[in-house]
Image (cartoon, rainbow, N blue to C red):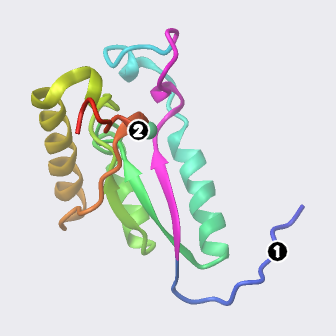
């Protein structure tokens, strides 16, 4: 079924935000492989993200993409493609760690690394951050 084009063309911004992760970054499952196995798994991010960018473009909608640093450093062209299409690039941390599980030292290192990677790729400051798995809690403020 074709997508309806009811929105006018132009630079429309939305409150839509999208976490950029691959299928093996799912949280809360004991069968999800650890980060040491991620490089050997089939990535599906390219085709899915390109399809998503096409849909967003067809409605002229701009969103915020919260990128995992681990994924961004392996798909630098996709990060730049999102940026070049007018979307905001933001951070979702490096390794999808839960703040309340890893503690402040590891969490800070994780988000600092992701921010550095993303800023290096886009050549601009990254201001947005979304914690993985709602990991910012009263236990990990
Ligand atoms: Zn996530």
Residue at x 19% of width, y 50% of height? 115
Q: Which residues are magenta?
A: 14-31
Mark 1 highlights which residue? 4
As for residue 83 lying within the magenta part, the answer is no
Residue at x 49% of width, y 59% of height? 17
Q: Residues within 10 Å of mark 2 (few under 14, many from 20)?
A: few
Task: State the image coordinates of residue 30 (x, y, percent, origin top left).
Answer: 49, 9
* Res. 125 image quadrant: bottom left
Task: State the image coordinates of residue 100 (x, y, percent, origin top left).
Answer: 28, 26
Mark 2 highlights which residue? 134
From this viewpoint, is residue 1 visible?
Answer: yes
Against 97, residue 83 (above or below) is below
SS at mark 2?
helix
Pick the front one: 126 or 75: 126
* Res. 90 image quadrant: bottom left
Task: State the image coordinates of residue 77 (x, y, percent, origin top left).
Answer: 36, 54
Q: Does the beta carbon of the residue at mark 2 sit less than 8 Å from ligand 1?
A: no
Against 87, residue 71 (above or below) is above
Residue at x 32% of width, y 36% of height? 137
Quarter of the image with the C terminus in it: top left
Q: Residue furthest front?
A: 138
């Amino acid at each position: 079924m074709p997508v309806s084009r009811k929105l006018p063309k132009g630079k429309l911004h939305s409150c839509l935000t999208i976490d950029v992760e691959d299928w093996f970054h799912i949280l809360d499952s004991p069968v999800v492989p650890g980060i040491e196995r991620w490089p050997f798994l089939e990535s599906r991010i390219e085709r899915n993200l390109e399809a998503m960018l096409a849909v967003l473009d067809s409605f002229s909608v701009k969103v915020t993409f919260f990128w995992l640093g681990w994924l961004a450093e392996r798909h630098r062209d996709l990060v730049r493609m999102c940026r070049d299409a007018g979307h905001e690039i933001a951070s979702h941390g490096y390794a999808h760690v839960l703040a309340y599980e890893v503690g402040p030292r590891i969490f800070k290192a994780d988000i600092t690394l992701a921010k550095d990677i993303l800023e290096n790729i886009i050549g601009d400051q990254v201001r947005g951050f979304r914690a993985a798995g709602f990991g910012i809690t009263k236990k990990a403020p």
